[in-house]
Image (cartoon, rainbow, N blue to C red):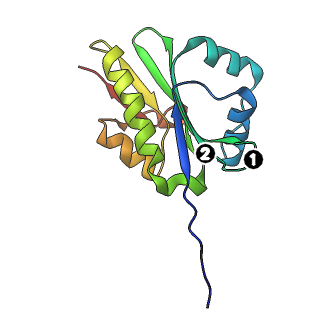
Amino acid sequence: MDIKTIMSIEFELVETAPLFHELLNLRGAAGHPAIGVEQADQRQTQALYWVTVRLKDKTENERVNVVATACVYGDRPRHLAIEDFIVLPEYQHYGLAKIILERVMAFVDEHVNTGTCVSINAYGEDERLCTEHGFVHSHCANLGPNLLKVYS
């Protein structure tokens, strides 16, 4: 007889950016391309909002690992970009993408004006979640984000 133990997992959602090395580790583990220091600095200075989900490890040192994140930044007038919308594959069945996207979209909805375009790259189940929030496929997906939402 095989006995399986189900451990409770405790997540912590914070509205701050992950540390640079945490973001690099998250991007690498999720199969996203690495970013350079210049891009990281740009994102930090232009970031309007970050949400990060950490896994609290119940060990002696209470180590905390980043398992998901998303960032909203403004790179030009009337355009916001949702970047680094990442959930580690092993934590995708906990509904973290939905929680993150709801937080990000609440921020965006409060801060945009009519005519603002919001872009995001999302695939698979994340793409379905984005379409529930009004995103549609971009006509120039091969040149940038695959989903857009224009506020009217």
Q: Which residue is mark 2?
A: 55
Horizontal side, residue 19 vs residue 1: left or right: right
In the picture as drawn, the residue positioned furthest to the front comes out as 60
Mark 1 lies on a secondary structure that is loop
Tell whether 115 sits left or right of 31: left
Furthest-bottom residue in this view: 1
Image position of 95 with respect to 27: above or below: below
Question: At which x and y percent is residue 16?
Answer: 57, 24
Q: Quadrant of residue 131?
A: top left
Dot 1 or dot 2: first in sequence order is 2
* Number of residue marks: 2
- In the picture shown, does residue 91 fall above or below 139? below
Q: Nearer the viewer, residue 4 or 35?
A: 4
Q: Is residue 78 left or right of residue 47?
A: left
Q: Look at 37% across and 35% down and name the residue there.
A: 102
What residue is at 71 percent from the left and 29 percent from the top? 35
Q: Name the residue located 65 percent from the left edge and 15 percent from the top edge.
A: 42
- Residue identifier under label 1: 60
For the C terminus, the quadrant is top left
Q: Nearer the viewer, mark 1 or mark 2?
A: 1
Label 2 crowd bin: few (<14), some (14–19), many (20+), radius 10 Å: some
Whole-percent x, y for residue 150 in the image: 31, 24
Residue 151 versus residue 99: which sits nearer the camera?
99
113 vs 121: above or below: above
Mark 1 → mark 2, Cα distance in angstroms: 15 Å
Secondary structure beneath dot 2 equals strand
